[in-house]
Amino acid sequence: AMDMHSHIDRILWTEDQISLRISQLAAQIVQDFPAPSSPPVFVGVLTGASIFLADLVRKINLPITIDFVSSKSYGSGTVSNCAPTISRDLNVDVNGRHVILVEDIVDTGHTLYKLIGHMKSKGASSVSVCTLLDKPARRKVDVQLVGEGKFYQGFECPDNFVVGYGMDFDELYRNLPYIGVLKPEHYS
Ligand code: PRP
Ligand code: MN
Ligand code: MG
């Protein structure tokens, strides 16, 4: 069918559930990084985190900085690559600043592991992680420990390949306003 929604087998989190959870995450972050301490740098990991970051930062009533890095781990398949590459680096200087890496999903943890190390090498005074989804079933690297900062998690994700709200299958479905699982015939 032409309609994108008809490709979805089931919805895991609705727009309203996502929005409510993001409000809670934003409130936690504001508590942990109160003004007038140095404003954190929110670093979105392109492309998946773009929609989450946009919604999250608009619920943060603090003067913050936004930047993006780009990292690819899946290519066009559904299996994560253990050697993600950074294909777009930061524009802002994070030396001496608190960084909050914003992710749509942590799967094996390889992407975040690499990015946490990268932020530290640039002199970040702390590196926290805010991920909308956490999929512990696939974890290879314990990114909650290497960050030494806070770890914010929206929802725990079952071991399915999910799409929507920034997450793609083969560069499609990022624009779904909710998060769901595709019908099997569309994973090909
Ligand atoms: C996905 C997702 C995370 C990463 C998680 O990005 O958005 O960034 O994989 O996987 P990992 O924990 O196993 O490293 P992807 O590489 O598909 O790029 P994209 O954000 O452009 O879709
Ligand atoms: Mn990504
Ligand atoms: Mg992807």
Image (spheres, grey):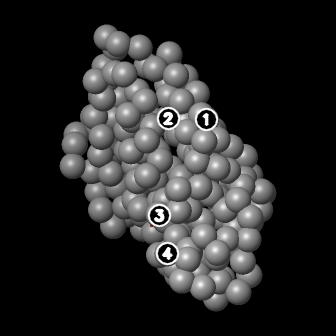
Crowding near pointer 3: few (<14 within 10 Å), some, many (20+)?
some
Q: Amino acid at mark 4?
A: Leu
Give the position of the C terminus as an image quadrant.
Answer: bottom right
Which numbered circle lies on residue 172?
4
* Residue at x 55%, y 39% (from the top left corner): 19
Question: Which circle's residue, 2 or 3, is located before the other in the chain?
Answer: 2
Counting residues from the start of the chain, the first of labels 1 and 2 encountered is 1
Q: Which residue is mark 1?
A: 21
Vertically, is 159 above or below 125?
A: below
Type of the residue with mark 2: Ser
Tell me the element at label 1: helix
Residue bearing mark 3: 175
Percent x, y of residue 138: 73, 61
Q: Which residue is mark 2?
A: 128
Q: Nearer the viewer, mark 2 or mark 3?
A: 3
Q: Give coordinates of residue 91: x percent, y percent.
A: 21, 49
Quadrant housing residue 64: top left
